[in-house]
Image (cartoon, rainbow, N blue to C red):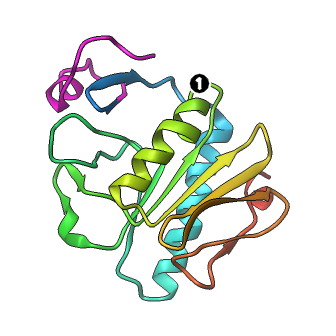
Amino acid sequence: MALSQTCTIDDIYALPEGQRAELIDGQLYMMAPPKTIHQRLVSKLGQKIANYIDRKDGDCEVFPAPFAVFLSADEKTYVEPDISVICDKSRLDDRGCNGAPDFIIEIVSPASRRMDYDRKNGLYMDAGVREYWIVDPEKERTTVYRYAEDAAPILIPFDQPVTSGIYEDLCITIADLML
């Protein structure tokens, strides 16, 4: 749900405790509470990626929502991706990530479908995100955007492995995580 007035980051921080929203180009979008499948996928995907990074002695960090991502310096865009992977530590401070994470995953819910596929896709590409996965439990597929290579999406059914573009040997079969 979008509110008609132009808002800033201050409006996000003024929300009542427990109420979550995202801010895109000055428009506030309230967020519905996530369902169990959503939280299960966030937890298991985040864990898989973090374990991979640890095994490889990598420098990147995995942050599940709620985690603040400030994509621009204009105070009019604030998002909370379901999973943010940040490799450039200089982008991190006490508030969250300033600039684009390297890798973002969104788990689609009925309330977020249009936002995740349309609005955030363009937003993340323009901000410099290298890779964006849209995990869609209803359609049982993952849409992968590897912006660093090509803007054309790759559609992968849940029963087939998804290979990351920024981690050459990270492969995850989403169906295995839903058990």
Q: In this view, does 158 lie to the left or right of 41?
A: right
Q: Does the magenta stretch include residue 176?
A: no
* Residue 97 higher or lower than 37, as above or below: below
- Mark 1 packing: few (<14 Cα in 10 Å), some, or many (20+)? some
Residue 7's quadrant in the figure? top left
**Of helix, strand and loop, which mostly describes the magenta segment?**
loop
Whole-percent x, y for residue 16 in the image:
26, 17
**Image point 19% across, 28% down: which residue?**
13
Q: Is residue 19 in sight in this rendering?
A: no
Residue 11's quadrant in the figure? top left
* Residue 114 higher or lower than 42, as above or below: above
Mark count: 1
Amino acid type for the residue under numbered disc 1: Ala
Q: Give the range drawn in magenta.
A: 1-22
**Image point 29% across, 39% down: which residue?**
78
The quadrant of the image that shows the N terminus is top left
Q: Does the magenta stretch include residue 5?
A: yes
Q: Is residue 44 in sight in this rendering?
A: yes
* Residue 88 higher or lower than 139, as above or below: below
**Most foreground residue, 123 or 164:** 123
**Image point 47% across, 42% down: which residue?**
120
Whole-percent x, y for residue 81 in the image:
44, 46
In the rendered image, the residue lying farthest to the bottom is: 56
Residue under pointer 1: 111
Question: What secondary structure is marked by label 1?
Answer: loop
Q: In this view, does 12 lie to the left or right of 121?
A: left
